[in-house]
Every structure is written in structure tokens, then in C-alpha cells.
Image: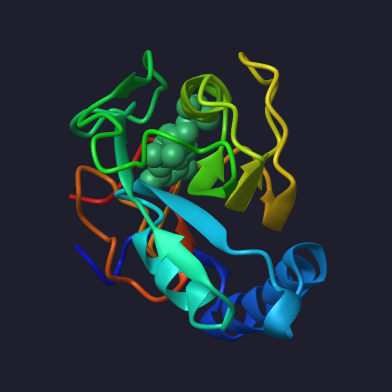
């Protein structure tokens, strides 16, 4: 089941090269060396865990990580439902006013998830608030939310691997795989 999920859309080499370049884009914005702005990085679990791990290894400046958990695709469903905060922002500092917040998510799809996250964080008035996504799907957005940093633009196909799941399987695959129409093979 795991190895026959579908066809490789983005392979490991492409992922590694693009994340190198993306880290460079982030260093250009946040600075590097002694003048680097500290980043408060907020990964959206679970899908962003692998992307986050690879990205932050390429960001040597001051950086703190405060993961949050959002639920939008319960069970095996591949159709968007209402996004909701699963565990809240409990570990996040109350005062973000002097913090440069960078949200890291796996996919910008309809925008409901990142719209919710953006609402929650902008209410805390951080010094800056930016969004970085591994994938941006070419679909109409339900919520008007923009990503500031995008690793890959992809067509409207359901993808798994590299942290992304179908019914919580496939997150461990090192490539980004497009599932065949109709879902994963049994
Ligand atoms: P929205 O529609 O809120 O969706 O922008 C964002 C979240 O939905 C999940 N998602 C996917 N997960 N393959 C996945 O494994 C996909 O193709 C896919 N599209 C959306 C994901 O959790 C994302 O953060």
C-alpha cells in the first residue's frame, strides 16, 4: 500500500534543491549573521513536520518553534471541511508584539486552514506575520489568504508523502506523490 500510492510528482532531489533556495529567500527577508531578526516559527501539524525539519536546518539564525494543530481533513476524507483548531495555541507566547512570526504549512488549498491561523495570529498583533507553504494548489480559494513563500505550485491533485497523508498513511514517503483519481489503492 505504502509504496504503490501513485506517481511521483516531486522527487527528493527537487525537494532538497528547492528548500535550499527557499531558505535563501527567508534569509534575505529575516537577515543573517548578527543582525538576523529572531523568527517565531509556527508549524501547522501534522503535515508540515517534515518540511519544517528540513527548512529550519537551513536557517542558522535565532529561531523558536511553536507548533499548532489544525484539523481540516478528518479520517480518509480528501474533500475540505471546515478547518478548526485542534489543540489551540497553548504554547504560544501571549505577547507576540515584538515577534516576527512565520507560519509553515504543508499546503495552501482552499485557504480555510491558513485563513483561520492567520486570523488567530493577527489578533495577537505580531511585529510581522508571514506564511510559508510547501505546496500551493491551483484551485480557487474559499478564504482570501496569500502565502509569502512557496516551495512548489502544483495542480489540483491530492498528494501524499513528505509529511502529507491519506488517512494518516504515507507521511513517511520521501517524495511528493499524486494519488490516482478516486484515492489510494487498497
Ligand atoms: P485548506 O483547504 O484549508 O487545506 O487550504 C489545507 C490543509 O488541508 C490538507 N490538504 C491536503 N492534505 N494532501 C494532503 O495530504 C492534499 O492534497 C491536501 N490538500 C489539502 C492539509 O492538511 C492542508 O494543511
**Residue extending furthest toward the right:** 28
Vertical arrangement, residue 113 with respect to residue 43, above or below:
above
Relative side of 108 to 80, left or right: right
Q: Quadrant of residue 1?
A: bottom left
Residue 6's spot in the image, x, y percent? Answer: 41, 60
Between 77 and 119, the residue placed more toward the observer is 119
Vertical arrangement, residue 48 with respect to residue 82, above or below:
below
Total numbered badges shown on the rendered structure: 0
Q: Residue at x 59, y 44 (%)?
A: 98
Between 173 and 85, the residue placed more toward the observer is 85
Residue 181 seen in this snapshot: no
> Looking at the image, what colour scheme do you see?
rainbow
Q: Quadrant of residue 62?
A: bottom right
Relative side of 3 to 12, left or right: left
Between 70 and 95, the residue placed more toward the observer is 95
Q: Residue at x 46, y 72 (%)?
A: 175
Residue 44's spot in the image, x, y percent? Answer: 39, 45
Quadrant assignment for ligand 1: top left
Q: Residue at x 59, y 78 (%)?
A: 61
Between 96 and 180, the residue placed more toward the observer is 96
Residue 104's spot in the image, x, y percent? Answer: 51, 51
Residue 14 seen in this snapshot: yes
Amino acid at each position: 500500500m505504502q509504496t504503490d500510492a501513485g506517481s511521483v510528482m516531486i522527487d527528493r532531489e527537487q525537494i532538497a534543491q528547492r528548500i535550499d533556495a527557499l531558505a535563501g529567500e527567508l534569509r534575505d527577508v529575516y537577515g543573517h549573521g548578527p543582525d538576523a531578526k529572531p523568527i517565531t516559527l509556527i508549524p501547522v501539524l501534522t503535515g508540515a513536520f517534515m518540511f519544517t525539519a528540513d527548512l529550519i536546518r537551513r536557517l542558522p539564525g535565532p529561531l523558536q518553534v511553536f507548533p499548532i494543530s489544525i484539523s481540516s481533513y478528518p479520517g480518509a476524507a480528501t474533500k475540505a471541511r471546515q478547518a478548526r483548531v485542534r489543540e489551540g495555541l497553548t504554547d504560544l507566547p501571549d505577547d507576540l508584539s515584538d515577534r516576527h512570526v512565520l507560519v509553515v504549512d504543508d499546503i495552501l488549498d482552499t485557504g480555510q486552514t491558513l485563513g483561520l491561523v492567520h486570523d488567530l495570529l493577527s489578533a495577537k498583533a505580531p511585529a510581522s506575520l508571514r506564511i510559508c507553504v510547501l505546496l500551493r494548489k491551483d484551485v480557487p480559494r474559499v478564504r482570501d489568504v496569500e502565502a509569502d513563500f512557496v516551495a512548489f505550485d502544483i495542480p489540483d491533485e491530492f498528494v501524499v508523502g513528505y509529511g502529507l497523508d491519506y488517512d494518516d498513511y504515507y507521511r513517511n514517503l520521501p517524495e511528493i506523490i499524486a494519488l490516482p483519481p478516486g484515492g489510494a489503492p487498497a
